[in-house]
Image: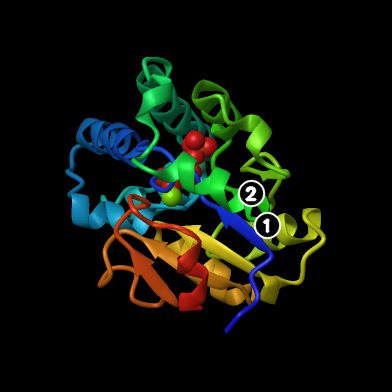
Amino acid sequence: MAEIKACIFDLDGVIVDTAKYHYRAWKRLCNKLGFDLTEEENESLKGISREGSLNILLKKGGLSLSDNKKADLTALKNGWYLEFIEKMKADEALPGAIEFIKATKESGRKIALGSSSRNALKILETLEIVDLFDAVIDGTKVSRGKPDPQTFQLGAEALKMHPCECVVFEDAQAGVEAALAGGMYIIGVGNKTTLNRANHTIEGFQNVGMEIFEKL
Ligand code: BG6
Ligand code: MG
């Protein structure tokens, strides 16, 4: 059995239900550009940086745009996304997620955030959970986004842990690959088939306690 001393949590779609807001904003942008974005297609965008996501979508729509135009489009999408999260309340955390993080901390394990989002701190503040984290690695601190392992490697380093002492909680395929590439354990949060490369999968944190670490 693995000895897990630290947990690194993704944010969007793991701690809080913001993945739906990213999807709505990207879909709106795609519609503006003349094509659609299904929920299934959106799976491959999860965990990917803002710019990386736009590039995937432009390829799908067969569009080639200048860097200036691309910057305008990511700003537009982020503006719509911010409108959604500005209305968000502290109770939009996913069921059981904050309770699980608190229990993990009380068990003596270290806690880090490992998110691609540059809006992460704002969301942690809305949820009033900034103080729970021993380290926060977000999109402002990385040069290589998921599926590159940098986000989680920086998290492990900040916690002074070896990768094999860490487990990552992720809802995105890109995040699962990032954790595996970083040599960490990975628990998928969501669909078992979509996240089939994870070491273990849970549907959510409801009724999940410290026994989860025995699965690794
Ligand atoms: C990830 C989301 O957490 O953050 C992606 O899963 C998003 O969908 C990425 O593109 C970057 O987020 P932001 O908030 O900086 O645009
Ligand atoms: Mg996510």
Q: Amino acid at mark 2?
A: Lys
CA distance for labels 1 and 2: 5 Å
> Helix or strand or loop: what does disc 2 sit on?
helix
Closest to the observer: 51 or 19?
19
Q: Residue 105 location, x and y as percent? A: 63, 49
Residue 47's tag is none
Image side of residue 8 versus residue 48, left or right: right
Q: Which residue is mark 1?
A: 109
Relative to 5, say whether 135 is above or below: above
Q: Is residue 125 above or below residue 180?
A: above
Q: Which residue is at a point 50% across and 75% down the rendered structure image?
A: 214
Q: Nearer the viewer, residue 193 or 27?
A: 193
Dot label at residue 105: 2
Residue 54, position as x, y percentages in the image: 41, 45
Q: Quadrant of residue 193?
A: bottom left
- Residue 106 percent across, percent down from the top left: 63, 48
Q: Is residue 126 visible to the viewer in this orientation of the structure? A: yes
Name the residue at 25% across, 31% down.
28
Label 2 near label 1: C-beta < 8 Å?
yes
Label 1: how many Cα within 10 Å (few below 14, some 14–19, many 20+): some
Residue sitting at x 50%, y 61%: 210
Please, what secondary structure does the residue beneath circle 1 have? loop
